[in-house]
Amino acid sequence: MNIQILGPEQQGREEFDGGKIRAQKPLGFSGQGAVTVRLGPLFYWAWGQAEAAGGIGFHPHQGFEILSYGIRGQGFHRDTLGTESTLQPGDIQLMQAGSGMQHAESVEAGFESFQIWLEPYLNDAVRREPSYSLYKAEEFPQTEQNGIKIKTILGEGSPVRQLVSDARMFDIEVEAGVSYVHRLLPNRTLAGLSIRGNGGSFLIQGQESIPFMNKDFAIAQTDKEDDIIIRAAGETLRIFLIEVPTEVDYPLYNKAR
């Protein structure tokens, strides 16, 4: 088992629309400053925040499955499929870019979101029709017990069923002093980004705990079945977790080219 904690200075950075939108990138493109640029099929992860209303004009995508998760404020989407939609807190929009599509994004001041790219087998993906889907916050299963709130974005009970890439995603809140346990199977990677609270610790049962702070990116990988224990420190912790296979049985795109 290996646990790695990467601070904001080890993650990528990018600005859009003259700096109106700023993104911290746990996983970004080569040359953007991220120490890690891929975890299995998890290809890109940007945490965007808008200091002022702004936007990104029409630009193309092909092949990849692109999820946007609303955290705060409103974002607006248009695409060449004829879609116009609004992303609000807790919503998920999914673009399966397939043979190709273009979209444009605009946001209000104070908007905050994740954009996450997953890579299916591209030789098949580029032969599929592109599609867009919007899922509202209330459609996702949520549980609350013993100081832990769990919202399942991808996984059992999620309304997002057409995703081709293998991934599970959770939005989790852990009260101060409480621990959340995540069972990780062999050849699986768990990635976590802390977005609220003052941090906490990651540990494996019987091993020394590893501290992390707000805005840190954690990566846990195992070659056997293990419990990952995430403990909140002095404040309620909000952490977003993505679990993917460490390796896949199809060739992956080399984005360094």
Image (cartoon, grey):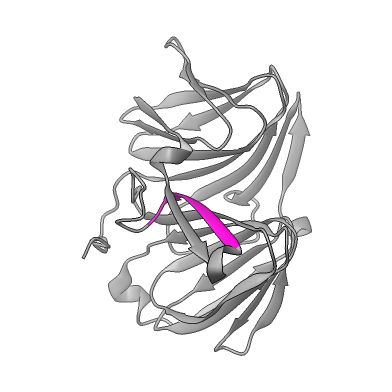
* Residue at position x 75%, y 25% in the image: 147
Instruction: Say left or right for 127 vs 103.
Output: left
Write the start and end of the magenta stretch as one range.
21-28
For image coordinates 62% across by 52% down, the residue present is: 153
Magenta stretch holds residue 253: no
- Give x and y (percent) for residue 248: 29, 52
In this rendering, does residue 161 appear at all? no
Q: Nearer the viewer, residue 13 or 117?
A: 13
The N terminus sits in image quarter = top left
Q: Nearer the viewer, residue 110 or 102?
A: 110
Give percent across and percent down for residue 12.
41, 50
Please tell me which residue is depicted at 73% across the width and 63% down the height of the picture: 109
Expressed as whole percent of the image width and height from the top left, the position of residue 36 reads 33, 45
Q: Is residue 66 above or below residue 248?
A: below
Residue situated furthest front in the rendering: 18
The C terminus, quarter of image: bottom left
Which of the 4 image quarters holds residue 70? bottom right
Specify whether residue 22 is painted magenta. yes
What residue sits 64% from the left and 84% below the top? 83
Whether residue 194 appears in this view of the structure is yes
Instruction: Return the x and y of residue 235 as percentages of the image width and height.
Output: 72, 24
Which quadrant would residue 254 be assigned to in this image? bottom left
Q: Against 53, is 220 above or below?
A: above
Assign the magenta stretch its main secondary structure: strand
